[in-house]
Amino acid sequence: MSHPTPAATVAAPGDRPALLQVRDLAVDFKVPAKGSLRPANLRAVAGVDLDAYRGEILGVVGESGCGKSTTGRAILQLLKPSQGTVTFDGVELTALGRGRMRAMRRRMQMIFQDPYASLNPRMTIGDLIEEPLLVHSRATARERRAKALTTMDLVGLSTRWHERYPHELSGGQRQRVGIARALVSDPEFVVADEPVSALDVSIQAQIVNLLESLQEELGLTMMFIAHDLAVVRHLCDRIAVMYLGTVVETAGCEDLYTRPRHPYTQALLSAVPIPDPLIETERRRRILKGDVPSPLNPPTGCRFRTRCWKAQDICETQTPALTSEAAGHQVACHFPEPPAPEPAAPPAHT
Amino acid sequence: MPLLEVQDLRTEFRAAQGSVTAVDGVSFSVDAGEMVALVGESGCGKSATAQSIMGLIVPPIGRVTGGKVLFEGRDLLTMKPRELRAVRGKGIAMIFQDPMTSLNPVLTIGKQLTESLRLHLSLNGRAARARAIELLEMVRIPAPETRLSSYPHQFSGGMRQRVMIAMALSCRPRLILADEITTALDVTIQAQILDLLRDLAAETGTAVLFITHDLGVVAGMAERVNVMYAGQIVERATTAELFHRPQMPYTWGLLGSVPRLDQARGGKLRPIAGQPPELSAMPTGCRFQPRCTHAHDLCAESPPALTAARGDTGHAQLTRCWGMQDVPRGGWLSLDDRHADQPKQEK
Ligand SMILES: Nc1ncnc2c1ncn2[C@@H]1O[C@H](COP(=O)(O)OP(=O)(O)OP(=O)(O)O)[C@@H](O)[C@H]1O
Ligand SMILES: Nc1ncnc2c1ncn2[C@@H]1O[C@H](COP(=O)(O)OP(=O)(O)OP(=O)(O)O)[C@@H](O)[C@H]1O
Ligand code: SF4
Ligand SMILES: [Mg+2]
Ligand SMILES: [Mg+2]
């Protein structure tokens, strides 16, 4: 890799520097409370730690409502965190004023799930793609147009769509517009929030391949939020698994999929259907009981304990911290699966 | 005699420019106690097919313009409304993707369950309540007695879908049409619901037409599969055949588009280029031809029928592809072409 190696950062896979560091991040929402005039506090993100290393795709998975989008938005400072820090390329975003944050914003962009809702129907495709440049650069109209056209080309949108409107496009093409809008200002870091979830499988594969090649070509660092675990495995270098506002496990992709250590990760993986009837009929599923509890009233101790088959008394009284025994594999559980018996494991950092 | 036999079904919708044909000559059957899948991408006509079977497509929105829907040998399309209501209550039940559309938000779960039981099974108040509790227990809802007085919004998405399964089973139907019932749910909840439906259908001997866009889900549920594309069935096979020896290039494309957890990582996905055709602008030949990497001239000229592949004896598998058929100028494809990087081209 051509990136400079910094003096001393956290133990990074392949010794790459962490471009993004999230520590103890929390986000609260005020929601109307039943039978009370005072709003209740909903802690959607409750103390999240994450690192994204330069040039990698970090997958964030977890079920609906676990706080993936909120985490992504708080990282980009589109939502104000109520606790914790977000550091990007050495700059603590959470401590920046508006003006300096604006300058940083060009370097960090977002791709949204619903390509239609996020595009102004009255703007042409060309204008939509140029729009971020109006905010982030002093380019002339001519330069902006040229940049929009090259970006359209980059994401595989025919430039003849330039003067057309979003409603004339298919879902997959709209998502390409969303990707072009995120990339037109040459960001280093992109949060892609469920960018393929709304698409049909055949179109989904087109967009996954596009994101993959764009990441390689542009050396992007990406946070890829999704609930499809097979797509995440295909695309990502490292994965963070979230449950009810917290990260319960982080590991390198293969590590996580071959040896999940948190019971929730195990259940999640066993629930993914595999398109092969022989495997499906032989397979023994770990079916979780019950539903995800409300974030308004999360369980004490380990938040997963109400659905966990391993839960003991300690799980109710003590919150397990995200700790790492094997290098790079972190898990927040009192009774995690033992780490992989890796003969070649590097010595743990102290 | 199959329990359900759909023959050459045609359904049209009113559109801006005249009408469009959303279901175009669909035929398939479901035997008693069998689970059959209907799989395909958004807009291919899965819901329209199910709604046509249920008699839910009525003017001015749309119309069933042809075909037969034989349920236990009787054609639902020519039945009088009264007979039809009886069949719909007791013979066939439908579960939708979004349970909120079929649950009444201002009535308690208990009220809705007991109403349906009293109406269709003529149970009295007390018997209906007892049966409702039994049903909630059967779909594994904890504390069913107290839950009877809850409103739909007090239930999670997964619990609402359980209630819908309970309602569907309440009148002991012989067939359930399940239309994308887990699409809105998370994977761990999806696993719970599929497990439940599979168990209950087997226990009660209820046949299920299982509609989904997810091939992974099909593999674990159905005995036979119908793949739909652009309003038509393009491949039909047992589940084992469909996944282990698929014959239609569209099915190859679908299987190549999804990464699999059980296979080694790496390598690009093989998406299908382009997108499905508009209903108002169907290709004249094979409907998949504009996206197909294996197409020959014949494919653009005339539409292939759903037939057995060349030399494919001993299987009930059918496919709608010229490349697989034993006709002049046809039959250039074999199962191995599925993985061919460079499709062969005539000329
Ligand atoms: N603006 C808001 N006001 C109040 N509560 C909110 C708001 N946005 C999110 N929440 C709540 O915060 C929690 C986390 O939501 P978030 O959207 O981050 O989840 P997610 O993991 O992205 O889910 P999904 O997979 O459904 O997109 C949920 O309980 C949600 O209801
Ligand atoms: N009420 C309607 N009026 C006009 N066209 C309709 C109507 N309902 C459906 N269609 C069209 O009929 C076709 C088939 O729709 P259908 O809902 O059956 O698709 P589907 O396979 O169920 O898709 P999905 O996976 O998105 O549910 C689509 O092209 C759709 O646009
Ligand atoms: S008939 Fe032709 S175009 Fe259609 S699937 Fe077969 S090879 Fe492809
Ligand atoms: Mg989200
Ligand atoms: Mg549908």
Image: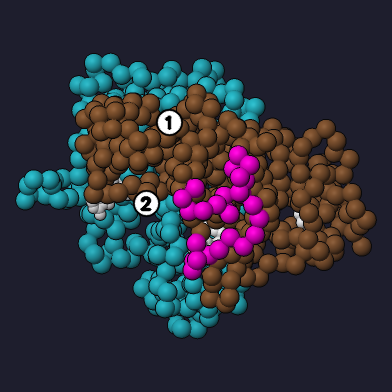
Chain colours: A cyan, B brown
In the shown orientation, is residue A319 left or right of residue B213? left
Q: Name the image quarter holding the N terminus of chain B.
A: top right
| Magenta run includes residue B60 | yes
Image quarter in which the C terminus of chain B is found: bottom right
The percent position of residue B22, horizontal first and vertical second, equals: 60, 61
> Which residue sits at x=64%, y=48%?
B6
**In this figure, which residue is indicated by the disc labeled 1?**
B192
Task: Describe residue B150's horizontal placement relative to residue A110 as left or right.
Answer: left
Q: Chain of mark 2?
A: B
Picture coordinates of residue A99 (x, y %)?
A: 25, 67
Mark 2 Cα within 10 Å, few/some/many (few <14, many 20+)?
Answer: few
Identify which residue is drawn at 36% across, 73% down: A135
Q: Respond yes or no on whether mark 1 lies under 8 Å from ligand 1.
A: no
Please say whether residue A82 is visible from this viewpoint: yes
Quick check: A18 left or right of B284?
left
Residue visible at 46% across and 83% down in the picture = A141
For residue B142, which quarter of the picture? top left
**Furthest-left residue in this view:** A37
Counting residues from the start of the chain, the first of labels 2 and 1 encountered is 2
Q: Closest to the observer: B161 or B48?
A: B48
Q: Nearer the viewer, residue B23 or A28?
A: B23
Name the image quarter holding residue A273.
top right
Q: How many marks?
A: 2
Q: Residues within 10 Å of mark 1 (few under 14, many from 20)?
A: many
Please give the chain letter of the residue carrying mark 1: B
Which residues are drawn in magenta?
Answer: B58-83
Q: Is residue B193 above or below residue B230?
A: above
Q: Which residue is mark 2?
A: B101
Under circle 1, the secondary element is helix
